[in-house]
Amino acid sequence: MNQAFITDKREIIRLEGITRNFQVGEEVVHALRGVSFAINEGEFVTIMGSSGSGKSTLLNTLGCLDTPSEGEYFLDGIPVRTMGKNARATLRNRKIGFVFQSYNLLPKTTAIENVELPLMYNSAYSATERRKKAIESLIAVGLGDRLNHKSNQMSGGQMQRVAIARALVNSPAVILADEATGNLDTRTSSEILVLFQKLHAEGRTIIFVTHNPEISHYTSRNIQLKDGRVINDTYNNNILSAAEALAKLPKNDD
Amino acid sequence: MNGTNLIKIALRALANNKLRGFLTMLGIIIGVASVITMLAIGQGSKKSIQEQISEMGSNMIMIQPGADIRGGVRQDASAMETLKLQDYKDIVNETRYLAAISPSVNSSGQIIYSSNNAPTTVYGISSEYLEIRRYKIEEGDMFSEQDIQSAAKVCVVGKTVIDNLFKNGENPIGKVIRFNKIPFRIIGTLESKGYNSMGMDQDDLILAPYTTIQKRVLAITHLQGLTCSATKEEYTDLAIDEISEILRRNHKLKQTDDDDFTIRSQQELSSMLTSTTDLMTVLLAAVAGISLLVGGIGIMNIMYVSVTERTREIGLRMSIGAKGRDILAQFLIESVLISVTGGLIGVLLGIGASLLVNGIARFPIYIQPWSVFLSFAVCTLTGIFFGWYPAKKAAQLDPIEAIRYE
Ligand SMILES: Nc1ncnc2c1ncn2[C@@H]1O[C@H](COP(=O)(O)OP(=O)(O)O)[C@@H](O)[C@H]1O
Ligand SMILES: [Mg+2]
């Protein structure tokens, strides 16, 4: 691990002793029991763990959707824990790009309109700027030829690309992907991984939450959760190329 | 997020579900259209009654002897002798708010000219009566002050009387007709006024000097009534107070005594007659208003379904930066757009239906601008009111749960 290489990069995420407790009836569920780590600009991190290990809770915290019970969270240097609801909404709008397992595109809506959506909630953008940014994002994910296709006219892989374009459109500090390949077949999953690797190569910071251990081979760092704690945090010195893996896959039958 | 973006988003959501949007609107459309039509019909009949009453005379005040109906049986006004000539003279001299005043003594009976005869009423009045009741002389002249002084046997006749007595187109001026065996020389004819709203023929009358009727026909010295005209409609009440004061003084009534006369104004008559149509209007509008309410509940219903259906969309919008108030505004704008568009169509439909009622059923209609604005305002409020709870529910969703909602 090249320490010098890491320290001259900006710190995007810093968690300090994050805990998250849920009150369920009489019982208190400890979803996170003291999670601390920092992620620098340009890292591609997988967060792994079995079901119930606290991945979703951690992702919600990182995405400023949830507030930790204890501990501090700094996103791009901004302390999030003390923020109100509206301030967190604005922070999400400016600093975070979400990619969900089930795409969550608006139905009967074109790719451009879907991608524009985050900028609709930022009054700094005019309609023309919005459109320009959306087209740039769609080109970046390889959908430059499907700008006006509606969400219900697209395949799963294409929809996930639109969702990724939407996550890119506000130039976020970090992209948070939640099982982003979970609904896709092997081939399409690889294609999406190729896209994420491309974005990584362009210097973007990506956090990919998954229960699939395969994925960690393609990312630069792997954080493993168990029972709400980090049990393993390693840097990957031998990142595999998703493009090569894709080339080795048998061609689609259909 | 700015307003234009919100409206764009709401319009897009509506465009995605055109049929549902239209069906939701239908409730509002029918509600507003019926409110407008009902009010148009109600106001139309009220207006026509008011017009007919105002044709009766200008700012009329009618004074009759005898107290107002109070519990028991009212005595026949003509039998009361409390109203005297002196009362008339004092009112003429003392009031400031009357433009015209005429005594009235009437007698009904058979009128005869050669072999023709017909029943009619002879009104003993002064010449100011024409102004008060808006009669105009068509041919000849009105009788003069001199005729009144001398109780001259002259008269002015209405068109119906002429038609009944002069069958072969004779010129009635100068002819002598008989009423109760007393000969009256016709010196003028009246312009026709037609029938009034109560179906009374306003041309079936004879006007004669009140002195003539008093002395030669009825053989009385009192008056059966006084008919006046206030200088302005606003002065009607002042005039009534003044007349009442004079009469109470002349009749030497004590503070505790009830009036021995009754004063009614044309305004009162008008509001008495229009109170029925007012009630009808209120009832019709209430029924129509209920259908607007039902329309509003329809909006609420659909908005609830819409919020539930679009839970994931709401979760997504929140996760990419929509604040609670953005979501609230989005759904509120959606419901207001439905109700306002429905209202607009409803207003047009209501106006169309009113014109149809007027054209086919010949019913008088009157579309008051305020009823249109009111319906429109009520629609917008309906949209806000019934859209509020679903929108609030949407705004309060937890994005974490909403985004994973199945
Ligand atoms: N809203 C909640 N209320 C109660 N318990 C919760 C809630 N969210 C998560 N948990 C609990 O916290 C633990 C971690 O859950 P989660 O973060 O969803 O794990 P993972 O995503 O790794 O499966 C689980 O035991 C789960 O039941
Ligand atoms: Mg989970």
Image (cartoon, rainbow, N blue to C red):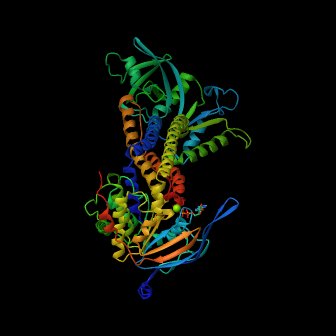
Residue nearest the observer in this picture, A60 or A227: A227
Residue nearest the observer in this picture, B345 or B67: B345
Q: Position of residue B361 (x, y in %)?
A: 39, 28
Residue nearest the observer in this picture, B311 or A58: A58
Left or right: B297 with respect to A173? right
- The answer to whether residue B157 is above or below residue B28 is above
Q: What is the total number of numbered labels drawn onto the structure image?
A: 0
Left or right: B225 with respect to B185? right
Residue nearest the observer in this picture, B360 or A38: A38
Q: Position of residue B123 (x, y in %)?
A: 50, 27
Outermost residue on the top side: it is B115
The structure residue drawn at horizontal position 41% and vertical position 23%, both measured from the top left corner, is B185
Outermost residue on the left side: it is A145
- The answer to whether residue A209 is above or below residue A108 is below
Q: Position of residue B98 (x, y in %)?
A: 52, 44
Asked whether residue B128 is in view, the answer is: no
Asked whether residue B314 is in view, the answer is: yes
Q: Quadrant of residue B32?
A: top left
- The answer to whether residue B83 is above or below residue B170 is below
Q: Position of residue A141 (x, y in %)?
A: 31, 66
The structure residue drawn at horizontal position 47% and vertical position 28%, both measured from the top left corner, is B208
Quadrant showing the N terminus of chain B: bottom left
